[in-house]
Structure formats: structure tokens, C-alpha cells
Amino acid sequence: MSEQVSTEHALELVNELHEWVIALEGASFDPAAMVEADRLAIEVLEAGHGRDKAIEAGKTCYITQLSDLPARVLVVDDESDVRVLLRLHIDRPGMSVIAEAATGADAIKAVDEQRPDIVVLDLNMPVLDGVEALKVIKERWPGTNVVVHTAFGELFKPKLAGIEYEGFVEKSGSFQEVTDKIEALVS
């Protein structure tokens, strides 16, 4: 049975969906797709399926959009050449470098502003090293995946004890190893 939904109820429904989206931290949606998800939720409500089903339909529409988005990657290394090479290897269908940083302090700022899915993090950097940056990133944004990429693995591995991170790649390896770690995280 189809029923007309009041503007007030439609706004409440849409606001609830938008609050849920905001809570996703870092997820971004195309405005036209957002309108589509909101429209779908209102249609389900108007069709008489109830508020819970309408919210579920809207969330499902949003989640479908998320699965089509590339993984958002932040590259952190004090060497600009390494950042360029990482960008060349990472930018491809399914993953995209959204920002770069040259210090641990800049990395923290970039994670706060950009909310990447994955951070490729050098450890030996000026201002604030990668170990300290990793601690802050994991404390403030625990859902952020971090792939450590360093030339000084043996030196830094003991300092990483007890700190969560999702991948470790020595710089003596290939850039493809970094890309493989990222692909494993997004699949």
C-alpha cells in the first residue's frame, strides 16, 4: 500500500541516513548518488514497508557506492623521488593516492584532513619519525590501515613491537610489494 510521507518524516529519514554517513568518517559520496540513496529510502517508506526497511534500503544504496570507490591512499616519505615512484605504482583502478606527506607530523595532519583508507608510511623521517606518527594514527584513527615502508627494518622493528600495523615492506624490495599489500587490504 502506497502512502504519502510528510515532508517532516522524509526529512527525519534523510537526516538519520546522513548522520550515519557522517559517522563513517572519511567516506565520500557523489552528491547525485546521495540524492539517489535518499530518494530510494523515501520510496520504500512511501511503499508502506516501514521506517526500518527504508533506512536499510538507504544504507544499502550508500554501501554499494562505497564498494565501487577506489581505496584512498596517503603516501608518507621524506624523499620526494620515493613518493613519486610509489604514486606511479599505486595509482590504478581500485586504489588512488589522495595525498602525500614528507614528515610524521605532516602525515598526522593529512590523515586528519583526508581520512585515507591506507597509509604507506616511511619510518626514518625528520620532525616526527614514522614510529611516533604510527602510534598517533592508530590511537586517533584505529580503522586506518598502515603499511610500513622502510629501508631500516632491522633498526626500527624493535621500536614497532606492540604497535598495530597491517603490512611491512622493506625498501630493498620492489614497489610492487607495496601495491600487493594494499591490494590484499582492499580485497
Image: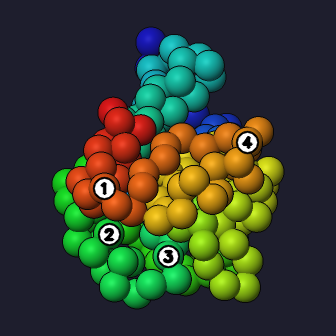
Residue depicted at x 61% and y 44%: 165
Q: Earlier in the sequence, mark 2 or mark 1?
A: 2
Q: Amino acid at mark 4?
A: Ala
Q: Is residue 180 left or right of residue 126?
A: left
Q: Which of the 4 quarters of the picture holds residue 39?
A: top left
Find residue 2 and report its horizontal and vertical position in percent: 44, 20
3 and 1 marks in contact (CB < 8 Å) = no
Does the CB distance between marks 2 and 3 fall below 8 Å?
A: yes
- Regarding mark 3 in the picture, which secondary structure is present there? loop
Q: Which residue is mark 3?
A: 77
The first of marks 2 and 3 along the sequence is: 3
Q: Residue at x 37, y 44 (%)?
A: 181
**x, y percent for residue 170:** 42, 55
Give the Cα separation between the discs numbered 3 and 1. 16 Å
Looking at numbered disc 1 in the image, what kind of residue is underneath it? Gly
Q: Which residue is mark 1?
A: 173
Q: Is residue 182 visible?
A: yes
Disc number placed over residue 86 in the picture, else none: 2
- Residue 16 sits in which quadrant? top right
Q: Earlier in the sequence, mark 3 or mark 4?
A: 3
